[in-house]
Amino acid sequence: MRRVAVAVLAAALVVVPAGGAADQARLTVFAASSLTDVLPAIDGRPGYSFAGSNQLAFQIRQGAPADVFASAAPSYARELYRAGLVERPRTFASNALVLAAPRSNPAGIRTVWDLRDKKVQLVVGTASVPIGDYTRRVLRRLGLASVLEKAVSQEPDVKTIVGKLAVGEADAGFVYRTDVRAAGGRLRAVSIPAWAQPAISYQVAVVRASRSRAAARAYVASLSTPRAKRLLRNAGFTVP
Amino acid sequence: MRRFAFTALLALALTVTAAFLLLPVLAIFLEVSPGRLLDQLGSEVALDAARVTLKTNAIALGLIVLFGTPSAYLLATRRFRGRALVVTLLELPLVLPPAVAGIGLLVAFGRQGLLGGTLDAAGVSVGFTQLAVVCAVTFVASPFYVRTAIAAFESVDETMFDAARTLGAGPARTFVRVALPLAGGGLSAGAAMAFARGLGEFGATIMFAGSLQGVTQTVSLAIYQEFDVNLDAALAISALLVLVSGAILLSVKVVSARAPSVWTSPPRFARSG
């Protein structure tokens, strides 16, 4: 009897139980951090994994079990599409870049030009993440590229920029318009001239390796319903 | 027979454990060739990160030992009400998620934090400086030292203190000449563990100090930044961190095996235990 028990225990150690069939029905959506609030409001049923678009694209390349990929920058979705990993991506929303400051505005920032003229603790995204890439493009267009040298931190994620502004540790940082909306009064936004704005379009695509592609396609379609558009607009996005 | 089967089962469990824990570490070295590894370690990002990490961790370790040693001695040699509570509180950062440490440091020492005004008046600004990195490292690494130091002082035979006192040594002299040497092995082990923990600090640092090459970007932050830009560089820095941390862990084992003391001659009076 005891030997049987030992054998069973050994078998349990060796055989790793395979994932249950029950979670097949539940979609997994990989989505950019900036969609953290709005996507679950549109559809609360899927499991969401929010991170930087670049990280999510990397994980999908490595075979992560995603059904849908919602990217904050077209380039990541397009690259995965070219590699044959996702179906044709489509734009479902767009965002805008703003210069954000803590509500108390310790550095007294009124326009984006104050970054050049005033003493400012500026935080920016690192060049490899979308927010950092957009920031550099905007500053170049404004002729303010030298402002980057003032940056006291190159952050890996838009969240850590928003956080440092919300607690008032930094004076200013470039974030998405939706981040200011989501921060609920802790941040104030200084808008950037429209002519300097980059096109920040959010693209969504069905992952080819998904085992529930029909449901994934239905999810993608659900992002264009009038209700979804209203929720996206409320969150600060522009919808096509 | 039954005994053999049981031993085989234990060995199987050990194999699974070891394979699971070692595979990711080995994979780092297999993924990038030694030549490329050395190449990448010469990069500016890696060198800057190594400098920042060494400097901030050395300062942090100094502070930890300076304040942690007397604190541990007090907690190990005196019994008072609430002692267990104090020890628990000191150990708290050990189990706190780094994100909690980061947020806590921001709202305590940040510009708008609890002590922000006081620090500002003193002309000290912590945010986005190496001082912030030192704070983060000290916060997360201290318990590793204090915990081990308490145990090290507690393991010193109490009759040694009595003997020192009988021979006319005051409490301070007893601490310096008897307690410190006898607990030396344990103290070094604790310091090494705290140092190893500090080297890998990530979460609290990115939240409190930010990340700027050559200023606040430590090796862990550099790995994260290079991860999707230059995977080879990220792997190379990771490999270096594995080697350094492994060396520290090994030296702890060696030092502990040679306890109690390496820096004084063995005590000449008899031991009771």
Image (spheres, rainbow, N blue to C red):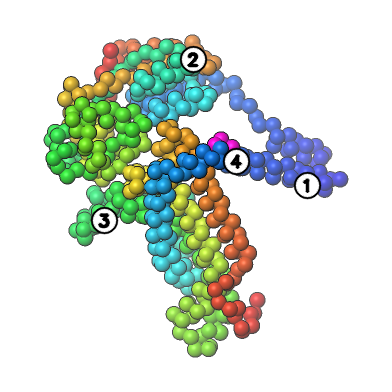
The answer to the question of whether label 1 and label 3 lie on touching residues, with beta carbons closer than 8 A, is no
Circle 1: is it few (<14), some (14-19), or many (20+) Cα within 10 Å?
few
Residue indicated by mark 4: B26
Q: Amino acid at mark 1?
A: Thr
For label 3, the SS is loop
Which of the 4 image quadrants contains residue A142? top left
Circle 3: is it few (<14), some (14-19), or many (20+) Cα within 10 Å?
some
Q: Is residue A181 visible?
A: no
Q: Are marks 3 and 4 on the same chain?
A: yes
Q: Give the quarter of the figure containing the N terminus of chain B.
A: top right
> Marks 2 and 4, Cα distance to the nearest angstrom?
31 Å
Q: Are marks 2 and 4 on the same chain?
A: no
> Marks 3 and 2, Cα distance to the nearest angstrom?
54 Å
For label 1, the SS is helix
Residue indicated by mark 1: B7
- The image shows residue B180, relative to residue B113, as above or below, that is below
Task: Give the residue drawn at x 48%, y 41%.
Answer: B39
Please state which of the two labelled residues, at mark 1 or mark 4, is closer to the viewer.
4
Please state which of the two labelled residues, at mark 3 or mark 2, is closer to the viewer.
2
The tally of labels here is: 4
The answer to the question of whether label 1 and label 4 lie on touching residues, with beta carbons closer than 8 A, is no
Residue indicated by mark 3: B115
For label 2, the SS is loop
Q: Amino acid at mark 4?
A: Leu
For label 4, the SS is helix
Residue lying at the far right of the rendered structure: B1
